[in-house]
Image (spheres, grey):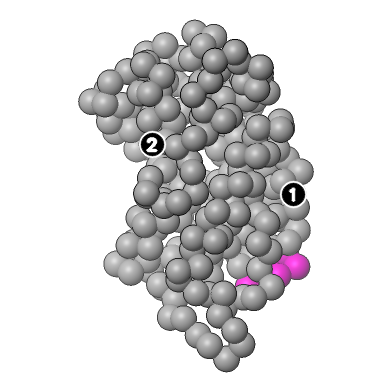
Amino acid sequence: MLTDGQKQPSASGGTQALLRLITWMSPAFPIGAFSYSAGLEQAVADGSVADAASLQDWLSGAIAEGAVWNDAVLLAESYRAAEDVQRLHAVASLAEAMTGSRERQMETMLQGEAFVAAASAWPTVGGDMPLRMAYPVAVGAIAGAHATGAEPAIAAYLHATASNQVSVAIRCGVLGQRAGVAVLAALEGEIAATAARAAASSLDDLGSAGLLADIAGIRHETLPSRLFRS
């Protein structure tokens, strides 16, 4: 973070903002996303996700009305709260309290902390910004500080989440790379619509109907043989 009196130009939309979002949401960004499956590995083991069609259904539900939807709402709120330290601390506490299992908490908190640390390459005003934030809150706060636009930031986050889940499914042997790309192509409309809806949301819109995904996330820690940490 910058010290008082220093200033970093904000992205303020356009190409610069796009480049920052691409970098922040890239698989190469050092937050360790590749090591987490958000319960998908358990779903594969259970047979709930066994091919491209069932993977698409799983991801569509998570994005539109599951834990990923809640992430989008929290990201939107933290984007708006980027310059309001008290409000940002409140949404950070809420996001951590909403984690439904030990692994889910580990996944989102460790990625959030790593995101804040890595994003310090783009200094922002706001020395009182909490360092301990769930991943979507960290993304929203940093994106808000750089004025990237809320809806593009949410869309980038949703796409990165879906991409990581497709990568998990590929590594679990559910489908190949071309089929994985086809799943991402099919989810474009869902991602765009959810990003628009979340950008206009408030905390009153929090709520998940992704019970199977939540249960899979809870059960994953007892899976005998695991590739992923969650």
Q: Where 222 sits versus 60, above or below? A: above
Q: Residue at x 49, y 63 (%)?
A: 119
The reply, left or right, for residue 181 in relation to residue 143 is left
User: In whole angstroms, how far apart are the C-alphas of marks 2 and 1?
Assistant: 26 Å
Q: Is residue 55 magenta?
A: no
The reply, left or right, for residue 99 in relation to residue 73 is right
Q: Residue at x 36, y 57 (%)?
A: 23
Q: Which mark is residue 173?
A: none
If you read the primary sequence from the N terminus, does the residue marked by circle 2 or circle 1 appear first?
Answer: 1
Which three-letter amino acid code belongs to the residue tagged 1?
Leu
Secondary structure of the residue carrying tag 1 is: helix
As drawn, the residue found furthest toward the bottom would be: 5
Q: Is residue 86 magenta?
A: yes
- Image quadrant in which the N terminus is located: bottom right
> Looking at the image, which is closer to me, 137 or 27?
27
Q: Which residue is mark 1?
A: 94
Dominant secondary structure, magenta: helix
Q: Which mark is residue 163?
A: 2
Q: Could you tell me residue 205's position as x and y percent? A: 66, 44
Q: Could you tell me residue 19's position as x and y percent? A: 32, 62
As drawn, the residue found furthest toward the top would be: 47
Q: Could you tell me residue 146's position as x and y percent? A: 48, 70
**Mark 1 closeness class: few <14, some 14–19, many ≥20 residues within 10 Å:** some
Secondary structure of the residue carrying tag 2 is: helix
Q: Residue at x 53, y 55 (%)?
A: 115
Q: Could you tell me residue 82's position as x and y percent? A: 61, 67
User: Magenta segment range?
Assistant: 83-87
